[in-house]
Amino acid sequence: MSAGGNTVEGAALDERARRILSFEARSWPDADAKNEAIRHELGLSGARYYRLLGGIIEQPAALRHDPLLVNRLLRLRDARIAARAHRTPTPGRTLD
């Protein structure tokens, strides 16, 4: 435990993490509009944004900050992982 009484699990989200969660909570007409906004509003590439978001939703502080959003994002991620695991290789395609 640190002097302030916070453990790593109890640490609050930093400003960037809160901005990313707020950004993700918004509704987007399409992926292109969202990717453009990621670049302009957050100054991040799409790949960097999604890597950061993936790490943020793993933090207990994120769940405390916005439980509905974080649980939805975790469910979507888990569904993507399960779908990827159940895909069968395309016949004739080599697996590298």
Image (spheres, rainbow, N blue to C red):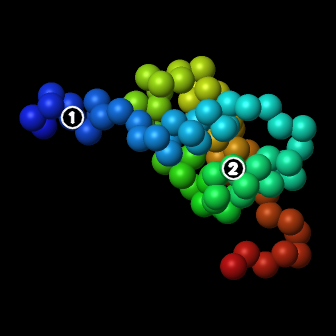
Whether residue 84 is visible here, answered yes or no, is no
Query: Badge 2: few (under 14), some or many (20 or more) residues near its Cα, within 10 Å?
Result: few
Which quadrant does the N terminus fall into?
A: top left
Q: Amino acid at mark 2?
A: Glu
Labels 2 and 1 touching (C-beta < 8 A): no
Amino acid type assigned to the residue bearing label 1 in the image: Thr
User: Is 1 on the left or on the right of 47, as rendered?
Assistant: left
Residue 43 in the image, given as x and y percentages of width and height: 64, 58
Q: Earlier in the sequence, mark 2 or mark 1?
A: 1
Give residue 41's mark.
2
Q: Quadrant of residue 95?
A: bottom right
Whether residue 21 is visible here, answered yes or no, is yes
Question: What kind of element bears circle 1?
Answer: loop
Image position of 16 with respect to 6: above or below: below
The residue indicated by pointer 1 is 7
Label 2, secondary structure: give it: helix
In which quadrant of the rendered image does the C terminus lie?
bottom right
Residue at the spot 76% in from the left edge and 49% down from the top edge: 37
Q: Is residue 58 left or right of residue 9?
A: right
* Mark 2 and mark 1: Cα distance apart in space: 31 Å
Q: Nearer the viewer, residue 85 or 2?
A: 2
In terms of image quadrants, where is residue 91? Answer: bottom right
Residue 24, position as x, y percentages in the image: 67, 37
Q: Residue at x 84, y 75 (%)?
A: 93
